[in-house]
Amino acid sequence: MQAAQAPSEVGSMKIGIIGAGNIGGNLTRRLTALGHEVSVANSRGPETLADLAGETGATAVTAAEAARGAQVVVVTIPLKAVPGLPAGFLDAAAEGAAVIDTGNYYPQRDGRIAAIEDGLPESRWTETQIGHPVIKAFNGTYAQDILTRGLPSGTAGRQALPVAGDDAAAKAAVRELIDELGFDTVDAGGLDTSWRQQPGTPVYGDQGDAAAIEKALAAASPERTAEWRA
């Protein structure tokens, strides 16, 4: 497996990451290594990100500043924290910016969110909270895989990630970025069908190739998701 890759040949992008936990931290590590300009924020303030910034060369900022000029914004925080994001935090993002939602609904952590319990896909709920279309990706990915399982495009058995969203251009940009990170992607449809990759579904945590991911998405059922939450 290839843990590191050469800097991007498709050009450096400005990327904002809100959330510096396992997924956010490892995306910061990989994306800076690929030559992208990364700003990273958390809920505790940029001074608490000095180590990550020093390690990666990313710029530690506040959540209100993370999306400034960004072509891609990654929101990777607990769902319960989404309503507390700064008002207008996406206003200064680049025109047509792709917003990636990596979040998952865990009632034991997030408290009961009635709309999701009633069937609204998790990323659709997040979209309504932040007032911007989102692309659902990385939500079922092990954080360590981001560092260790990336492989060159065309490698047999390359791990694939499902990607869901309604904005075709934003989805294409996200899929290209994931390919750059070393993973294939499977188009999982629009946000209304993104429940197929939520916790409790067969694809969640699946490290298979594109064929395996397509099969797992097809096997999802709303009943299984509800049983998992219960």
Image (cartoon, helix red, strand yellow):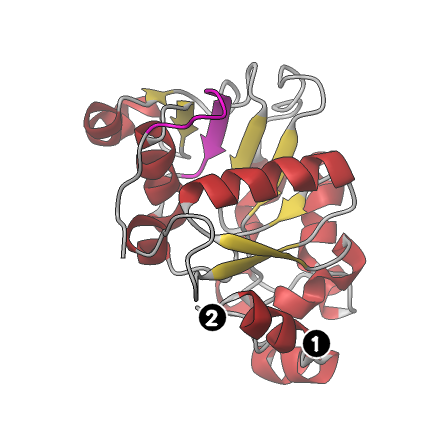
Which amino acid type is shown beneath numbered disc 1? Answer: Ala
In 3D space, how far apart are the residues under numbered discs 1 and 2 (Cα atoms)?
14 Å
Q: Residues within 10 Å of mark 2 (few under 14, many from 20)?
A: some
On the image, the x and y values in percent for residue 169 come to 73, 34
SS for tag 1?
Answer: helix
Q: Which mark is residue 218?
A: 1
Q: Is residue 62 left or right of residue 126?
A: left
Q: Is residue 94 above or below residue 229?
A: above
Q: Looking at the image, can residue 148 be seen? A: yes
| Quadrant in the picture for residue 144 | bottom left
Is-magenta flag for residue 52?
no
> Which residue is tagged 2?
208
Q: Nearer the viewer, residue 148 or 120?
A: 148
Dominant secondary structure (helix, strand or loop) of the stretch shown in magenta: loop
Q: Looking at the image, can residue 76 be seen? A: no
What residue is drawn where x is 53% and y is 21%? 64
Q: Nearer the viewer, residue 115 or 123?
A: 123
| Bounds of the magenta segment | 7-19
Q: Is residue 180 left or right of residue 137?
A: left
| Quadrant in the picture for residue 86 | top right
What residue is drawn where x is 62% and y is 19%? 93
SS for tag 2?
Answer: loop
Which amino acid type is shown beneath numbered disc 2? Answer: Gly
Q: Give the quarter of the figure containing the C terminus.
A: bottom right
